[in-house]
Image (spheres, rainbow, N blue to C red):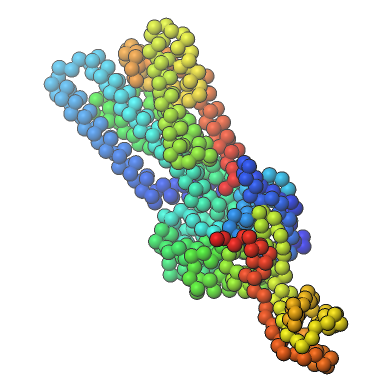
């Protein structure tokens, strides 16, 4: 079994003169919940379609669950929830799931039980007999989520899964993602809701013009603190000494800024300063949010207005 | 194959649920009711008077059978175009196709599955309407068409040509554009058929040849003319020009071409659909 659920190298897609994805190189380890972030028009959805084989690359290539992009058979092990899930609205949710189950090659035996369990999981067990055209946007999206989970996939692509969902629906998606992770499933999450990504993902990639410009391990990033110190006197020896407690030490008059690798460093840092006889007037620390990371990585020029 | 049949089943289910099949059935039955009523009173009256000339009655029955089937041919062709007109293009624009195409099913199976379902529905519609016309003539005019199955098969082949053109168009064109193109193809074939027929009377081989070439581009109308030829005894064939007359009979090679055309159009649709970004 390959180590990576998704591996791509210099994946490129052009539509006429428009370059939607310039050169996507990704390596998503198995079992990881991977966030794919970028501003509007960054090529996120096209990238996702390239990985799903819905769009063929102009150049470059890659593998998904060890199979080359565009392979048909591997799709039996992949789940996909499009951003705006739509299906023939004359069907009801049970028929929708039954049809997709058969399309996935699931045996008839046990399919009904699986469908009922999924309808219950997404809170549509009471509405399973109603045609999809009577569903609200959120209900349709939840039916789509059940469809994506139907084949017990090893890899799930979720494109803005919570668009149209109320807060409880969002919690449901978050719980489902946690369950998928616990079951060893890889999740590729394309979302604009950074709080959601922060709460669910192991790692995120920031994409700009169809190129991954930065990757961030959220477990490590979560431990990283921005520390600001106001001290009586700043000299080179002090800055050198502070480097033992973190990274990115900079000075601005009586202010020293740095990144601490963990919260546990802070008491030691304070003790060390006091021990050296440094007058410590203020020690402030805070975690950088994913939104701040996003703005920093994308650059202020990406902000509209 | 499993995927093809599942898509075909879904297509049928959708047509039924959206009440398209019901609407077609009601309109078809209405047509048969009008046609049957007209035949009942028309021939019933003539028989009751006892003044009917058997030869004249037979000619009238032949003409009315062909006329009835001419309308049936038009209705069935329209259904063959309208049923799939929104199928692929609509699913592509709404995003429904993304969920289907991301499943372990070859895209060709989606195209072929839809084609199969629509072909079966078109065939059933033709059987209902065509069978109804033939049965009405049998019951009310005591007229048995000399051939039924072969003309029906030819009409079905003509409808299959239009169905295949529409399916192929739906891969790349929007619904309305596809409709314009499909009916455009039908119109071109229709006028080419007339050109071929009328100008054959004047022994204009150049114009007749142009008609044949256009028929090769769109062989649907040729199939109707061959069907009309198969249905009409020689006496009625003497009617010559007009939608029911057949001066220049489309050859067996044209029938072969129409079959090949259907295969090529569906294969082209599948090939294009495989390449199309969704």
Q: Is residue A212 above or below residue B77?
A: below
Seen at 50% across and 39% down, the residue is B173
Q: Is residue A180 above or below residue A106?
A: below
Name the residue nearer the viewer: A75 or A261: A261
Answer left or right for A169 relative to A178: left
Answer left or right for B37 relative to A238: left
**Is residue A217 at all visible to an observer of this figure?**
yes
Q: Position of residue B239 (x, y in %)?
A: 32, 13
**Is residue A178 at all visible to an observer of this figure?**
no
Q: Position of residue A254 (x, y in %)?
A: 75, 82
Seen at 42% across and 6% down, the residue is B203
Q: Is residue A282 above or below residue A15?
A: below
Which image quadrant is residue A232 in?
A: bottom right
Q: Position of residue A98 (x, y in %)?
A: 51, 58
Answer left or right for B181 relative to A66: left
Name the outermost residue toward the left: B49
Seen at 45% across and 32% down, the residue is B182
Seen at 62% across and 56% down, the residue is A42
Answer left or right for B176 relative to A234: left
Name the residue nearer the viewer: B255 or A120: A120
Q: Position of residue A116 (x, y in %)?
A: 50, 68
Image quadrant occupied by the N terminus of chain B? top right
């Amino acid at each position: 079994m390959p180590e990576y659920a998704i591996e791509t190298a210099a994946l490129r897609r052009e539509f006429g003169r428009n370059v939607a994805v310039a050169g996507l190189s990704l390596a998503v380890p198995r079992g990881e919940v991977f966030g794919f972030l970028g501003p509007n028009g960054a090529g996120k959805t096209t990238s996702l379609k390239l990985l799903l084989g819905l769009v063929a690359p102009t150049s470059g290539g890659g593998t998904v669950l060890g199979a080359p992009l565009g392979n048909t058979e591997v799709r039996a092990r992949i789940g996909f929830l499009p951003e705006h899930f739509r299906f023939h609205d004359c069907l009801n949710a049970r028929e929708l799931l039954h049809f997709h189950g058969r399309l996935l090659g699931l045996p008839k035996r046990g399919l009904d039980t699986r469908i009922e369990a999924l309808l219950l999981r997404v809170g549509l067990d009471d509405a399973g007999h109603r045609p999809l055209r009577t569903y609200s946007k959120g209900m349709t999206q939840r039916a789509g989520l059940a469809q994506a989970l139907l084949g017990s996939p090893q890899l799930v692509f979720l494109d803005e899964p919570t668009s149209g969902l109320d807060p409880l629906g969002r919690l449901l998606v978050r719980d489902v993602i946690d369950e998928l992770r616990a079951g060893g499933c890889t999740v590729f999450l394309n979302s604009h809701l950074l709080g959601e990504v922060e709460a669910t993902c192991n790692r995120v990639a920031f994409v700009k013009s169809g190129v991954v410009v930065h990757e961030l391990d959220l477990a490590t990033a979560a431990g990283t603190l921005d520390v600001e110190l106001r001290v009586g006197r700043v000299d080179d020896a002090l800055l050198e000494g502070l480097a033992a407690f973190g990274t990115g030490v900079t000075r601005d008059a009586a202010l020293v800024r740095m990144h601490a690798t963990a919260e546990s460093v802070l008491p030691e840092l304070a003790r060390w300063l006091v021990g050296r006889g440094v007058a410590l007037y203020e020690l402030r620390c805070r975690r950088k949010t994913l939104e701040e990371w996003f703005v920093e990585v994308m650059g202020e020029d990406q902000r509209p207005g | 194959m499993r995927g093809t049949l599942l898509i075909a089943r879904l297509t049928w289910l959708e047509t039924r649920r959206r009440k398209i099949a019901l609407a077609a059935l009601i309109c078809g039955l209405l047509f048969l009711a009008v046609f049957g009523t007209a035949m009942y009173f028309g021939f019933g009256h003539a028989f009751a008077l006892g003044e009917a000339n058997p030869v004249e009655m037979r000619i009238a029955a032949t003409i009315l059978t062909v006329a009835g089937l001419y309308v049936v041919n038009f209705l069935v062709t329209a259904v063959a175009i309208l049923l799939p007109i929104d199928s692929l293009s609509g699913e592509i624009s709404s995003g429904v196709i993304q969920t289907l195409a991301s499943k372990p099913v070859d895209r060709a199976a989606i195209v072929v599955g839809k084609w199969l379902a629509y072909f079966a529905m078109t065939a059933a519609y033709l059987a209902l309407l065509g069978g109804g016309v033939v049965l009405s003539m049998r019951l009310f005019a005591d007229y048995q068409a000399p051939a039924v199955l072969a003309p029906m098969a030819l009409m079905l082949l003509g409808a299959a040509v239009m169905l295949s053109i529409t399916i192929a168009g739906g891969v790349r064109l929007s619904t309305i554009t596809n409709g314009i193109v499909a009916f455009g193809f039908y119109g071109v074939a229709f006028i080419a058929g007339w050109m071929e027929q009328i100008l054959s009377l004047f022994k204009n081989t150049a114009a007749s040849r142009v008609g044949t070439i256009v028929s090769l581009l769109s062989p649907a109308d040729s199939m109707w003319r061959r069907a009309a030829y198969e249905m009409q005894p020689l006496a009625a064939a003497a009617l010559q020009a007009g939608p029911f007359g057949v001066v220049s009979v489309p050859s067996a090679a044209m029938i072969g071409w129409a079959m090949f055309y259907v295969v090529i159009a569906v294969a082209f649709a599948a090939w294009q659909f495989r390449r199309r970004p969704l």
